[in-house]
Image: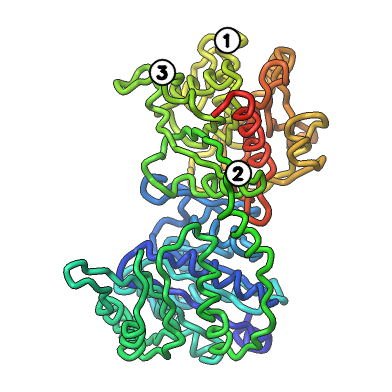
């Protein structure tokens, strides 16, 4: 889209930057603002720009980067897009996330194709131009978008962020200053010896922004468990040249779904709309407020053991954590979940513990997604414990594949059954590589990604949960249930309750197994999905399988005591 058309449509742009420290909360702040603007009838688009050189986070270790969030159209993105989805109705696609790597890759590819007519390719104007093109592309195909919120990853002062900051500086001049709002999220450290929050780091961060040519319109001050005093607000306003009403107090608040209400009390959205020259309109946050009130009044509690391999990073399973909270709201109960490293249950590890000694006090067990062989035998032991003791079990992606392997080994007697991902020579490859994955060498962006249809079998746990014959859920995997063994499993009591129908190149049709469960006479609630249901869960629309799992955990607690 050209700049003239963009201006003609009067799209407004909000750019969110961060200062002082990383992980300062730009994603939650952006999502909260998006919710507040939507509550006033504005349609928004959201985007996260990351300064790392990876093309996307798909190849990054969860221990380092946290969760990889997946969109309907198959983009592997930063976890902040998960915040955007849980708070807003913004349509998230491949256009909603880009990185330094993606920007440079595009520019270099164009240079090789001769797109620059032999000119010297430089950061300015070519890299900054590509960044601006990505920002414009975010809203190019949606004529109804009123406001685009663009979060710039990293911290002001870092070398990596400079091209993006220069690009948004230029962007403001191109679309008109009246069409842009710059929001800076900073951290105010508390010095115990002085018994006060210090504003100097924020002043320096804003100075660094101004050296680049960007003057923030609003400053969000993260203050931990403290709150800004009036004199501190005055000080930040004075030295950063921001009106007092543009200084937003942002102490740590739990749950995070309270944060938009804190912002609303300070008229954050009204300040932004005034800067952008937009009508304030009436705000309706009734549903959100009711949800938060319900969340804060939950009394009954269920305990869930979540078993995985990335348990040392708090954000590695971020969407699963939030989906538990959402399911608790739907079931009027608090979900207390604990992530437990699967290595603890692997007999080959020194720290081995019997699953019964650790898991007996929980009302439900989840085995989460993951890649690689570390901790696999521990996960298999966990599934066996849940199955044999009839504790509600929920498996996601690899957690479904592990359930299939455990059933094959310990119920069907298929000794050595495994996934070919871990054991290519297994005598019983009950989980095998997807047909289209054979021969794939490049690992980035080549998995089965995005939303696919799933046809639900009537009379099953899945059917009771979804109450729809066909659903669409998001995937991120290379391996699948091997249909060669499907009849054997079904005859033994494992139900294939969800399948995806697809056409092969030769015109034949095949079914990919999407959901498996056990017959009720084998287990009261045992269900697992190849897809990632957590990616579509929101506090206002909890994910059906998570809701059913927590409902089963409540029933288990009722029958077996606390």
Q: Residue at x 80, y 31 (%)?
A: 457
Q: Residue at x 40, y 68 (%)?
A: 251
Q: Which numbered circle lies on residue 150?
A: none
Q: Position of residue 87 (x, y in %)?
A: 59, 62
Q: Which numbered circle lies on residue 354?
A: 3
> Which quadrant of the view contains residue 300?
top right
> Which quadrant of the view contains residue 10?
bottom right
Q: In this orientation, which residue lies closer to the viewer: 438 or 526?
A: 526
Looking at the image, residue 553 sits to the left or right of residue 233; the answer is right
Q: Position of residue 375 (x, y in %)?
A: 41, 27
**Which element carries disc 2, helix, strand or loop?**
loop
**Which element carries disc 1, helix, strand or loop?**
loop
Front: mark 3 or 1: 3
Front: mark 3 or 2: 2
Q: Position of residue 168 (x, y in %)?
A: 46, 80
Q: Which residue is mark 2?
A: 333
Crowding near the residue tagged with mark 3, few <14, some 14–19, many ≥20 C-alpha atoms within 10 Å: some
The quadrant of the rendering that contains the N terminus is: bottom right
């Amino acid at each position: 889209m050209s700049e003239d058309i963009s201006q003609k449509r009067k799209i407004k742009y909000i750019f969110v930057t961060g200062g002082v420290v990383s992980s300062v909360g730009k994603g939650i702040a952006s999502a909260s603002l998006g919710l507040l603007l939507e509550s006033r009838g504005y349609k928004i688009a959201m985007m996260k720009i990351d300064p790392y050189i990876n093309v996307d986070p798909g190849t990054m270790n969860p221990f380092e980067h946290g969760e990889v969030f997946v969109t309907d159209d198959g983009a592997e993105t930063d976890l902040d897009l998960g915040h955007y989805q849980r708070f807003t109705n913004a349509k998230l696609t491949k256009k909603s996330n880009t990185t330094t790597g993606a920007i440079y890759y595009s520019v270099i590819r164009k240079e090789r194709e001769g797109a620059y007519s032999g000119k010297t390719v430089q950061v300015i104007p070519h890299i900054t131009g590509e960044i601006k093109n990505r920002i414009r592309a975010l809203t190019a195909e949606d004529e109804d978008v009123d406001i685009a919120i663009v979060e710039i990853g990293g911290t002001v002062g870092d070398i990596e962020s400079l091209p993006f900051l220069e690009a948004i500086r230029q962007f403001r001049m191109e679309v008109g200053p009246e069409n842009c709002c710059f929001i800076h999220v900073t951290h105010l450290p508390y010095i115990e010896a002085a018994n006060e929050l210090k504003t100097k780091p924020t002043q320096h961060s804003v100075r660094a922004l101004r050296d680049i040519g960007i003057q923030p319109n609003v400053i969000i001050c993260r203050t931990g468990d403290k709150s800004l005093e009036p004199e501190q607000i005055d000080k930040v306003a004075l030295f950063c040249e921001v009106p007092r009403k543009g200084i937003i107090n942002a102490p740590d608040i739990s749950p995070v779904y309270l944060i938009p209400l804190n912002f609303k009390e300070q008229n954050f959205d009204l300040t932004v709309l005034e800067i952008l020259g937009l009508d304030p309109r009436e705000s309706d946050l009734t549903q959100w407020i009711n949800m938060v009130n319900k969340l804060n009044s939950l009394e009954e509690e269920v305990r869930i053991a979540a078993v995985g391999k990335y348990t040392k990073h708090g954000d590695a399973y971020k969407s699963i954590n939030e989906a538990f909270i959402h399911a608790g709201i739907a079931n009027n109960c608090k979900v207390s979940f604990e992530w437990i490293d699967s290595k603890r249950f692997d007999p080959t590890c020194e720290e081995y513990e019997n699953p019964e000694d650790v898991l007996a006090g929980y009302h439900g067990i989840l085995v989460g997604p993951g890649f690689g062989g570390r901790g696999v035998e521990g996960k298999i032991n966990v599934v066996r414990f849940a199955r044999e003791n009839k504790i509600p079990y929920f498996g996601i992606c690899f957690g479904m594949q592990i359930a299939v392997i455990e059933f094959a080994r310990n119920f069907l007697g298929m000794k050595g059954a495994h996934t070919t991902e871990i054991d290519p020579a297994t005598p019983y490859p009950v989980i095998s590589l997807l047909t289209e994955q054979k021969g794939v060498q490049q690992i980035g962006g080549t998995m089965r990604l995005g939303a696919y249809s799933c046809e639900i079998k009537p009379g099953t746990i899945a059917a009771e949960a979804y109450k729809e014959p066909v659903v669409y859920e998001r995937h991120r995997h290379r391996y699948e249930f091997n249909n060669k063994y499907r009849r054997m499993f079904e005859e033994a009591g494992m139900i294939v309750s969800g399948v995806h129908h697809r056409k092969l190149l030769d015109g034949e049709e095949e079914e990919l197994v999407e959901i498996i469960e056990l017959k009720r006479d084998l287990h009261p609630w045992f269900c697992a999905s190849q897809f990632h249901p957590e990616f579509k869960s929101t506090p206002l629309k909890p994910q059906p399988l998570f809701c059913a799992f927590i409902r089963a955990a409540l029933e288990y607690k009722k029958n077996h005591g606390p």
